[in-house]
Image (cartoon, grey):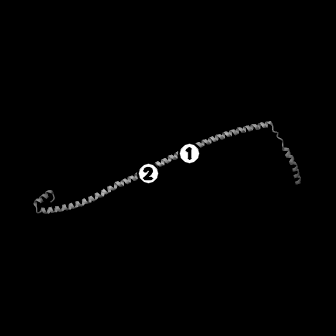
Amino acid sequence: MKSKIFIILLLILPITGHLNAKDIPYTLEDRDRLIRVEAKLEGFEKRFEQIDKRFEQIDKRFEAVDKRFESFENRFERLENFIIGGLSLLFTGMLAMVGFIMWDRRSVVNPVIQELKNKESEINKLKLKEEELERRELLLEAVLKEYSKTEPKLAELLKIKGLL
């Protein structure tokens, strides 16, 4: 049974394939349509070429803008370097000024310290002399008081001056 169906199908298939095949005639109208389609395609190609040119122009503009940005970046870098150099110079000058002030202060202070030491030694010497003079004065007063006991004129003079 299967073989009969298979044989029938084998006989029918070539006939059906032949039935579906039709000759399509290529007419003058088809040719004109094809020419119009080709013309439209050429128009589209021209438009695409124009769009490509516009994109190229836009790309050139973007490149020009990129170059401008790069030039601005370079300017800012130069300005930044200039500012950093100026600030460095300013801080270096200030540090040099502080160093000079400290050095000058030491050079001024050292002679003053030496002078103070000299004055202190002079003051100590004068104090010793003053103590010696006070001791002598006390001794002299004691001698005068003793002598005034035997000399009445001297005693009177000492009373007038408030020493007795």
- Where does residue 61 sit, x and y in percent of width and height? 60, 41
> Could you tell me the amino acid type at mark 1?
Glu
Q: Nearer the viewer, residue 99 or 44?
A: 99
Residue at which label 2 appears:
92
> Could you tell me the amino acid type at mark 2?
Thr
Q: Residues within 10 Å of mark 2 (few under 14, many from 20)?
A: few
Measured along the vertical axis of the image, is residue 96 above or below residue 33? below
Secondary structure of the residue carrying tag 2 is helix
- Where does residue 49 sit, x and y in percent of width and height? 67, 40
Secondary structure of the residue carrying tag 1 is helix
- The picture quadrant where one finds residue 122 is bottom left
Query: Earlier along the polypeptide chain: callout 1 or callout 2?
Result: 1
Q: Nearer the viewer, residue 144 or 41?
A: 41
- Where does residue 108 sit, x and y in percent of width and height? 34, 54
Measured along the vertical axis of the image, is residue 4 above or below residue 55? below
In the image: residue 108, left or right of residue 143 = right
Quadrant containing the C terminus is bottom left
- Where does residue 37 sit, x and y in percent of width and height? 74, 38
Q: Residue at x 41, y 52 (%)?
A: 96
Residue at which label 1 appears:
70
- The picture quadrant where one finds residue 103 is bottom left
Q: Residue at x 15, y 63 (%)?
A: 143
